[in-house]
Amino acid sequence: MRTLAIFAGFALIGAMIFTIASFSAAPEPEPVAAVKPSTETLQERLKRLPGDYRGWAELGSHYVDQARITGDPSYYTKAEGALDTAAELKPGDDAVLAGQAALAAGRHEFSDAVRLAERALDANPYSAAAYGVLADAKTQLGDLRGAERAVAKMLDLRPGVAAFARASYAAELRGDVDAARTYLRYAHQDAWLPADLAYARHYLGELALHEGDLVTANDWYTKALQAYPAYTPALAGQAKAAALGGRLSEALDIYERVVERLPLPQYLIEQGETQLKSGQQPDWTLLKAQWGLLESAGVRDHLTRAEFEADHGDPVLAVKHARAEYDLNPNPVSADVLAWSLYKAGKPEEALPYAKEATSTGWRNPLLRYHRATIEQALGRPARVDPGFDPSLSALARFS
């Protein structure tokens, strides 16, 4: 789901550089010459001030961001170490708890993320960061009303890119695409960091893509990369637009660059489906290796595993992973994946209630609508499958 991308969409430059700045203030009222800022890395600061619990919390949060930016799950282990140090130095600090909540969310432990975010808010009711993690985790747990309340608090406390992006996603999930687009435009207007500009432009592209406007989508992806060339989701967006537009060779060339930068399971599946569409046989070795790395770092990825097995592997195994995901996080996407896995396993009657649940919020996601219509048709019920939807590229219809 798109919410997971929100964690990594902000302050990427700061997360990559890990640099803090200190400025010497001029005494009043004597005029003095301007003093240039001195910089040191966060790690250097913590060597100098090992008791700086907020610094350790910040470092932990940076590592969480790095895990999502690079696709390297070993950063989660580093984040855990930094945040544990922060918690030992200052138990119950709101920034430390918010960082621990973000780490739990990164590992898909959303119930723990809610618990930790709520503890952070008990310590500091004005923590916009904690409300952001709370909104993300509640979305993943299927508590969309609770997520919207958290987003509203975040908008009150700190209206900006992070809050507008979450408000956009909340609107999108209830089917209000116009409001979703408006909030993303607010985020775009508020953004000044290149990575934040890229983030907003990328998701404006995603909205256009899923409305079938490939030209506008590709334009936004291109503008995102102009703002921040290292923003891989926008590069993947260009690959999706090319593939869905029938330009398969171009799409595969772009996907090669995408997975070299960021070999996330979602991108590897998209690449594999594009290869199949072009008559090539994909090699899923790297995909399976990535799942192994995620598991070793404590990250559960039942969702994409179930999606993959349903469409390209063992439907029985797909049902197993889909049930595990739904039991933990009963949101629209997990309901859809469980419905589709059951259908592919030959159980359309059992699948239909989950397909209805997946589409009950009003979310106008083409993949969810295709799955429900297909299941209803299998049961002899009247349903219209969008003739413009390409089921052979179903992974490309997921929001990144």
Image: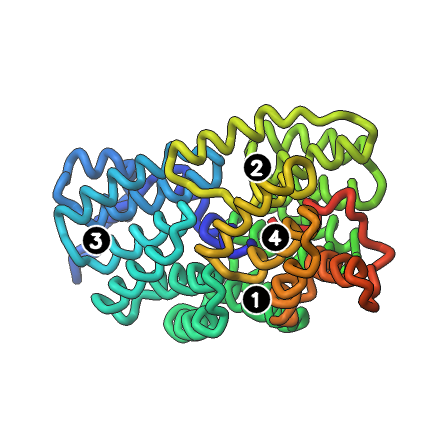
Callout in the foreground (2, 1): 2
Q: Which one is earlier in the sequence, the residue at label 3 or at label 2? A: 3
Q: Seen in the image, is 131 located left or right of residue 26? A: right
Q: Which one is earlier in the sequence, the residue at label 2 or at label 4? A: 2
Dot label at residue 168: 1
What is the spatial separation of the Cα atoms under label 2 and label 1, in whole angstroms?
Answer: 25 Å
What residue sits right under mark 3 in the picture?
25
Q: Nearer the viewer, residue 123 or 113?
A: 113
Crowding at dot 4, Cα within 10 Å, few <14 / some 14-19 / many 20+, comes out as many
Q: Nearer the viewer, residue 352 or 369?
A: 352
- Res 273 → quadrant: top right
Element class at badge 4: helix
Label 1 sits on what residue type?
Answer: Ser
What is the spatial separation of the Cα atoms under label 2 and label 4, in whole angstroms?
Answer: 16 Å
Which residue is depicted at the point 59% across and 64% down? Answer: 184
Q: Seen in the image, is 325 located left or right of residue 21? A: right
Element class at badge 3: loop
Callout in the foreground (3, 2): 2
Element class at badge 1: helix
What is the spatial separation of the Cα atoms under label 4 and label 1, in whole angstroms?
Answer: 23 Å
Element class at badge 2: helix
What residue sits right under mark 2 in the picture?
265
